[in-house]
Image (cartoon, rainbow, N blue to C red):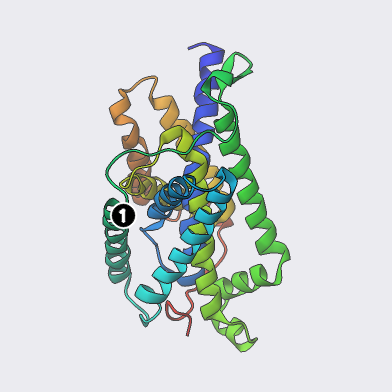
Amino acid sequence: MSAAQLLQYLLSGVATGSIYAIVGIGFTIIYNSTGIINFAQGEFLMLGGMIAVSLQAFLPLTAAIAGAVVVTGLVGVAVQLVFLSWLKKPGVLRMIIITIGLSILMREAALHVWDEKVHALPPWSGDETSSLAVLGARISPQVAWVLAVSALMVAALTLFFRFTLTGKAMRACASNPAAARLCGIRAPWLVSLSFFLAAAMGALAGCVVSPLTQTQYDMGTSLAVKGFTCAVLGGLGNVSAAVGAGILVGVLESASISVLPLAYKDVVALTIMLAILLLRPQGLFAGMTRKRGPLGRVGGA
């Protein structure tokens, strides 16, 4: 394998892994705030892409993407308020079944609202013929957008948690829910905010990747599995580790194409997840994971 081919696989893997990392971060945000592992997270990417495609028919691309992000974020809040907020200290198995059921419900609703066809947003700038040369490898402008948007989302989320009062309140709830409530922090509002952030980030990721991979009503399941793999690999509750895990999964998946048939690409993420669950269930970066506690109930009593 030449150096140019190796770099090509690396760039492709980093771009794909960035999307997986965003899904993994969505898992982590909700898990930190509520203790829930939300298996409907992948459907937020699908909804973001689908809604943006519909809005783009009569709005400029930028406005369509912004509208899709806001609407999908509100869907995330609605999911939390309607289906989860009334549950008091639900068991892990019950929450897994509920979120998987929500994933199926959202997927079937998308099938009826749209159709089973493949849709796609236009490239944000340029096209495949205007790809950029990087040390012998080729990278399309949309891949550059994927990398840039993913990096900006991670940076913005990091700054939000570290330097804003709301972000610090969310971290306080994750660290010590009882003490946070005694300090007057409104836990129910923060739970809804966590669902909004996770859904909105997923929607933006779905929009930026749509010109590359296209968007279909059933794309969320595969993304949820790979995002969960990243969250587990990094150690549930650790945002920065989820980013590194996502890039690692993307690079390994991309490299596997050179030695395995394309049909086996999805097996890589499943194999990694099973290996981590069996050999190191606390994740590779467990030492970096902050202590997390649920908010007593999903609605944050």
Nearer to the camera, 104 or 127: 127
* Camera sees residue 49: yes
Q: Which residue is disc 1 drawn over? A: 113
- The relative height of residue 169 versus residue 155 in the rendered view (above or below) is below
- The relative height of residue 153 versus residue 164 in the rendered view (above or below) is above
Nearer to the camera, 281 or 223: 223
In the image, residue 130 lies at what x, y percent?
58, 20
Q: Residue at x 47, y 46 (%)?
A: 206
In the image, residue 26 lies at what x, y percent?
49, 57
The residue at the far right in this view is 163
Q: On the image, which quarter does residue 91 sit in?
A: bottom left
Nearer to the camera, 155 or 115: 115
Q: Is residue 123 left or right of residue 99?
A: right
Q: Is residue 133 left or right of residue 215?
A: right
In the image, residue 196 lies at what x, y percent?
51, 65
The number of numbered discs placed on residues in the rendered structure image is 1
Identity of the amino acid at label 1? Val
Q: Is residue 255 left or right of residue 216?
A: right
* Camera sees residue 237: no
Q: Residues within 10 Å of mark 1 (few under 14, many from 20)?
A: few
Q: Residue at x 36, y 51 (%)?
A: 277
Q: Secondary structure at mark 1?
A: helix
